[in-house]
Amino acid sequence: MDVKTIQSWLGILVSSFIVFLLPPFYKNYNKTIVKRPKLYFYDTALPASLLGIHKMEHLPAHPLRGALFESLVVSELIKQKHNTGASDAFYHWRDKTGREVDLIIEKKPDRIPVEIKSGKTVQPEFFKNLRYWLKLSGEKKGKIIFAGDTDQKRSEGIDVISWKNIAINRAN
């Protein structure tokens, strides 16, 4: 398929508020970064339906559960940002080695990295890329939004937030 055709159809999806593109965070930190936007759906029911997920019982075992959960959380934070008139800028960060931070919320002068995990239990690997980015960037705070129920404050400056509380916390 021609690239211009794909760009045209993508433009229609963006203009129709079906999908949005999350731009990459460009500060290099002496690493080669990936400069492609990530595509998210405003309503995760559409990609779930396209993936053949028609019942809630199918979702927990689906291999794309994490991507759907990430899309849900990012879209909700974007909607909250627009509804409150906040001036925060949202990005994602990924380097060529595959290290990635799902969301960078730029609240001048701070940048808050956010990892989004569909697990219901906090696991040590949830912190890996977040710790790497904090060390690389020199930032002091980070967030993990997960599918569990209990918020936690960690001594290392990382807060763990239940997805149920993002409307209250807005990942601040």
Image (cartoon, rainbow, N blue to C red):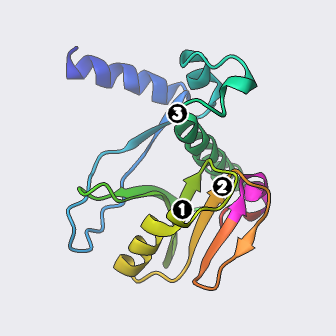
Q: Quadrant of the N terminus?
A: top left
Residue sitting at 44 percent across and 22 percent down? 12
Q: Secondary structure at mark 3?
A: loop
Q: Quadrant of residue 93?
A: bottom left
The magenta stretch is 161-168
Give the main secondary structure of the magenta stretch.
Answer: helix
> Between 13 and 101, which is closer to the camera in this rendering?
101
Residue 12 or residue 55, whichever sits in front: 55
In the picture of the structure, the residue carrying the numbered disc 2 is 146
Q: Is residue 13 magenta?
A: no
Residue position marked by numbered label 1 in the rendering: 126
Which amino acid, by three-letter code, is at mark 1?
Phe
Q: Which residue is mark 3?
A: 64
Q: Secondary structure at mark 2?
A: strand
The answer to whether 137 is drawn above or below residue 126 in the figure is below
Which amino acid type corresponds to the residue marked 2 in the rendered image?
A: Phe
Q: Is residue 154 left or right of residue 26?
A: right
Judge left or right: residue 138 versus residue 7: right
Q: Quadrant of residue 129?
A: bottom left
Foreground pick, 124 / 130: 124
Q: Position of residue 120 (x, y in %)?
A: 70, 52
Residue 35 coordinates in the image, percent (x, y): 27, 51
